[in-house]
């Protein structure tokens, strides 16, 4: 190849692009506790509550919005996992009962998992005054919710 041809190839170098990963925000325990408490009362917050939370704990509104979106996704994933685990446990129990009973069909009740112990170990935080409008909402960790 000629010297001129090499020069053309060398001049046609594609610049490399370096992508930098954004750092994942880490929240302090107090920031996380406040957002968890608000989420416990309502998984969907309005713009004013989002602004108030962001200002009170010193993070951007976008971070609060993303935290709530991620928390709802986590809740949905946990619910799916619980349902599939309960179904697998019920199927295993039914198989074991049929095996031990010699194949006779028995009326089995669906096993239920009590969440009372898990809920009783959680502590309720009092909300700051600017989030007082969320105070009357039911505790969503309990189902069915208690009457007001």
Image (tube, rainbow, N blue to C red):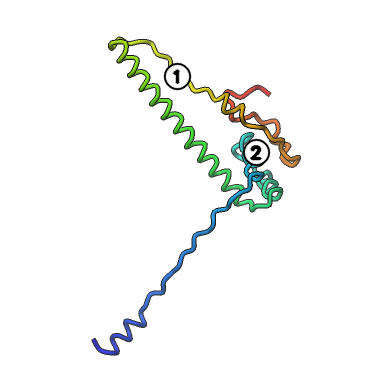
Task: Classify residue 45 as left or right of residue 4.
Answer: right
Instruction: Give the total number of marks visible in the rendering.
Output: 2
Report the front residue among 94 and 40: 94
Tell me the quarter of the picture where residue 34 sits: top right
Q: Residue 63 appears at what percent x and percent y?
A: 60, 51
* Above/below status of 142 relative to 22: above
Tell me the quarter of the picture where residue 115 sits: top right
Which disc number belongs to residue 38? 2
Q: Residue 129 appears at what percent x and percent y?
A: 76, 40
* Above/below status of 46 relative to 63: above
In this view, the residue farthest toward the bottom is: 3
The residue under the point 64% across, 53% down is 60
Labels 1, 2: front one: 1
For marks 1 and 2, give the CA distance.
31 Å
- SS for tag 2? helix
Task: Classify residue 67 as left or right of residue 108.
Answer: right
Count residues near mark 1 (Cα–Cα under 10 Å), then give few for <14, some for 14-19, many for 20+.
Answer: few
Task: Classify residue 7 as left or right of residue 128.
Answer: left
Give the residue pinned by disc 1: 111
């Amino acid at each position: 190849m000629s010297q001129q041809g090499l020069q053309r190839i060398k001049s046609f170098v594609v610049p490399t692009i370096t992508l930098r990963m954004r750092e994942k925000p880490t929240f302090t325990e107090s920031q996380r506790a406040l957002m968890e408490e608000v989420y416990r009362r309502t998984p969907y917050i309005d713009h004013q509550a989002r602004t108030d939370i962001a200002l009170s704990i010193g993070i951007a509104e976008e971070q609060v919005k993303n935290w709530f979106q991620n928390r709802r996704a986590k809740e949905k994933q946990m619910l799916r996992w619980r349902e599939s685990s309960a179904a697998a446990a019920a199927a295993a129990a039914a198989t074991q009962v049929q095996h031990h009973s010699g194949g006779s069909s028995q009326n089995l009740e669906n096993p239920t998992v009590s969440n009372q112990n898990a809920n009783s170990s959680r502590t309720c935080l009092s909300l700051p005054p600017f989030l007082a409008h969320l105070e009357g909402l039911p505790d969503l960790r309990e189902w069915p919710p208690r009457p007001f």
